[in-house]
Image (cartoon, rainbow, N blue to C red):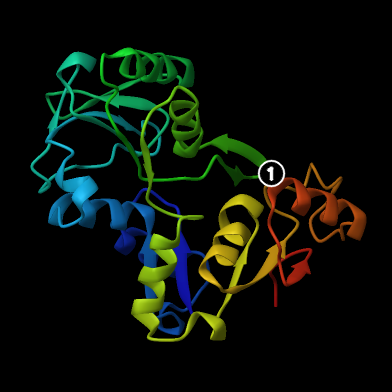
Amino acid sequence: MVIISNSSRRAVVTYDKLRALGFDPSLFLGAITSGELTHQYLLRRDDPWFAALGRRCIHMTWNDRGAISLEGLGLEVMSRVDDADFILAHGTEAIGSPSGGSQPMDLEGLEQILELCAKRSKSIPMVVANPDYVTVEARDLRVMPGTLGAKYEKLGGDVRWMGKPDKVIYESAMRLTGINPKECITVGDSLHHDIKGANKAGIQSAFITGGIHADKLGLGSFGETATLDAVHSLCTKFDANPNFVLPSFTW
């Protein structure tokens, strides 16, 4: 088993959480996160798109969750849009400062910065280190950096998505396991990210209905079974095709 996560944190952080969540880490080969892929691509610069980015960035990060460090990447955080070479989105709660700290900022403020970036004579590219639109926290949905990426794309910006549903994260997992994709299955609750990503990568998938789509499927309690009509309608909307459908991932 491999954890594939759109977390903007490094892989070791996600892996270390397993024991606290009640899992035995020895049962997993490892973890692949969007944050880890972003860090490695920015560090190596062997991909032509990343090689052309430049070193000066507008950094969107976390506040309550703790800002994400850019140490070791040779990047310079800018406060002025006109001085930046690209946008780096790790979070949706704060904007990084040249001093190394961060200033809390709401979603509207971050979106205004994106609008300024898009209005430049030549809009600058954006790296999204967490492609999720939302995540579930105690049954509430919390906005993730993917929402900022989608906003920037609508403004005409060039966005590189460093996680699901892009095949880059699945290819990394396959290299870790050394197993043919056709012999694997992805389990997830996001039709756009988990299931559609698995479809693109040629991996079977199990859609968990009790996650971020629970309200849209008319589910009121954990473990409740969604109707096949509701599931089919939502899958059609997202152009995602799961092989299996489960109300929850429990055993």
In the rendered image, which residue does mark 1 sit on?
Answer: 139
Q: Position of residue 156 (x, y in %)?
A: 43, 25
Residue 75 occupies which quadrant of the picture? top left
Q: Is residue 24 visible?
A: yes
- Tell which of 196 and 37 is nearer to you: 196
Q: Residue 122, percent across and down?
A: 26, 20
Q: Is residue 75 left or right of residue 189?
A: left
**How far across and down, in percent of the image, does residue 207 sit?**
70, 63
Question: In the image, residue 112 lies at what x, y percent?
Answer: 41, 13
Name which residue lies at 69% across and 52% down: 239
The quarter of the picture where the C terminus appears is bottom right
Residue 209 quadrant: bottom right
- Residue 80 appears in the figure: no
Left or right: 236 in relation to 104 = right
Q: Nearer the viewer, residue 139 or 210?
A: 210
Query: How many numbered tags mark residues here?
Result: 1
Q: Is residue 56 left or right of residue 124?
A: left
Residue in the picture at 34% in, 78% down: 175
Mark 1 surroundings: few (<14), some (14-19) or many (≥20) residues within 10 A: some
Residue at left offset 91%, top offset 55%: 229
Q: Is residue 42 above or below residue 92?
A: below
| In the image, residue 166 above or below residue 103 | below
Mark 1 lies on a secondary structure that is loop
Q: Which residue type does callout 1 highlight?
A: Arg
